[in-house]
Amino acid sequence: MGDLYYFCTKFFILKLTREIKTAILAITSILLFIYGYSFLKGNDLFETHKTFFVEYDNVDGLSKSAPITLNGLMIGKVNKISFANLQGKILVEIRLDTDFEFSKKSQAVIYEPGFIGGKQIMIVPDITDQTKAVSGDTLSGYIRGGMTENVMKKLEPLQEKVELMMVDAGLLLKNVNSILDESTKKSLKNSIIEVEQTLTHFKELSIELKVILNDNKTHLNHSLANLDKTTANFSKISDSLAQAPIGKTIRTLDATLQKADLLLADIQAGKGSLGKLAKDEALYTNFTKTTKELELLLQDLRLNPTRYINVSLFGKKNKPYAAPAAQ
């Protein structure tokens, strides 16, 4: 009887335990599903957060669960986006998971972090205001132009210029068409034909030139070899000239010219025999007189040699001396 009671009690407890386990598993699955669904929507059931509201005229493609940053650090997400009133104002509910406190005058700026990423919100703190923002406050906000918008703004003037250029190009083509009448087109066609013929002649000339070069290739090689030898010889001559004592020769010549200048200066000043001969009038006169007398003496010696050489074979007396007539 006791064994039967023990067996029944154990069977009931085991059955009850399986039911409890099944219930706990079901409840846990439901909780995990709710948490996962909330997490995918951007909600975290186990974290405390602060909620703020921002009104915009246009959110420029901002989507729900978009990141919210402060100085580049992600501090929250966009929780809800809805119309605030009938005028079309848009109310954005943001949820921040941070302990950082900022002022009530801080701004929530919608911006574009890059070309690929979507729109985000950036909290710009106002350090001049001491009133701290609390959960439930409404912050002011605006949209800052993104990279794409800035590029488009810079491309707009370029687009206008391109459009003007296209208009000018159209006018130019229209004017060209008006200028190119039938006679002009015919002349242009003839010119193209002549250019083609010229190119053909030039091609034939190049072929003939190639044949000439091939026929005289040996002579050209010899000529180039001779030119190389001449260049080498000239290089040797230039090396010899570079090694010659030209500087010493020039210095010696300069010293000689200086001495010649001194000699000419002494002669000009009347120094030395040459200087006295060139400058002394009396010496020049005496030299001239002596030269004249020597000339008379030689003339008399030629005319009357017996007066100076006494040779008498027969004892004949010499004639008396008579001075020659003055000339």
Image (spheres, rainbow, N blue to C red):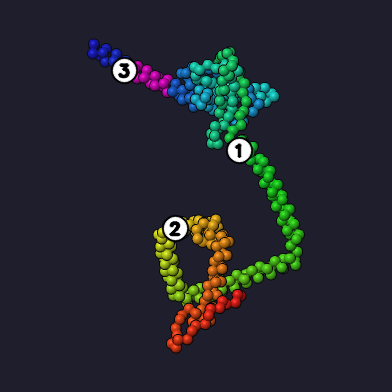
Q: What residue is shown with label 2?
A: 252
Q: What residue is shown with label 1?
A: 151
Eye-nearest disc, 2 or 3? 2
Q: Amino acid at mark 2?
A: Thr
Question: Which span of residues is magenta-colored?
Answer: 15-29
Describe the element under mark 3 as helix, strand or loop: helix
Describe the element under mark 1 as helix, strand or loop: helix
Residue at mark 1 to residue at mark 3: CA–CA distance: 73 Å
Label 2: few (<14), some or many (≥20) within 10 Å?
Answer: few
The answer to whether residue 228 is visible is no
Tag 1–tag 3 contact (CB < 8 Å): no
Describe the element under mark 2 as helix, strand or loop: helix
User: Depth check: 249 or 311 in front?
Assistant: 311
Query: How far from the left and from the top, in percent, is residue 278?
Result: 55, 61
Q: Residue furthest top?
A: 2
The answer to whether residue 143 is visible is yes
- The image quadrant that residue 285 belongs to is bottom right
Query: How far from the left and from the top, in percent, is residue 292?
Result: 56, 71
Label 3: few (<14), some or many (≥20) within 10 Å?
Answer: few
User: Depth check: 81 or 77 in front?
Assistant: 77
* Count of numbered circles on the image: 3
Residue 18 lies left or right of residue 92; in this view the side is left
Q: Residue furthest bottom?
A: 314
- The image quadrant that residue 116 belongs to is top right
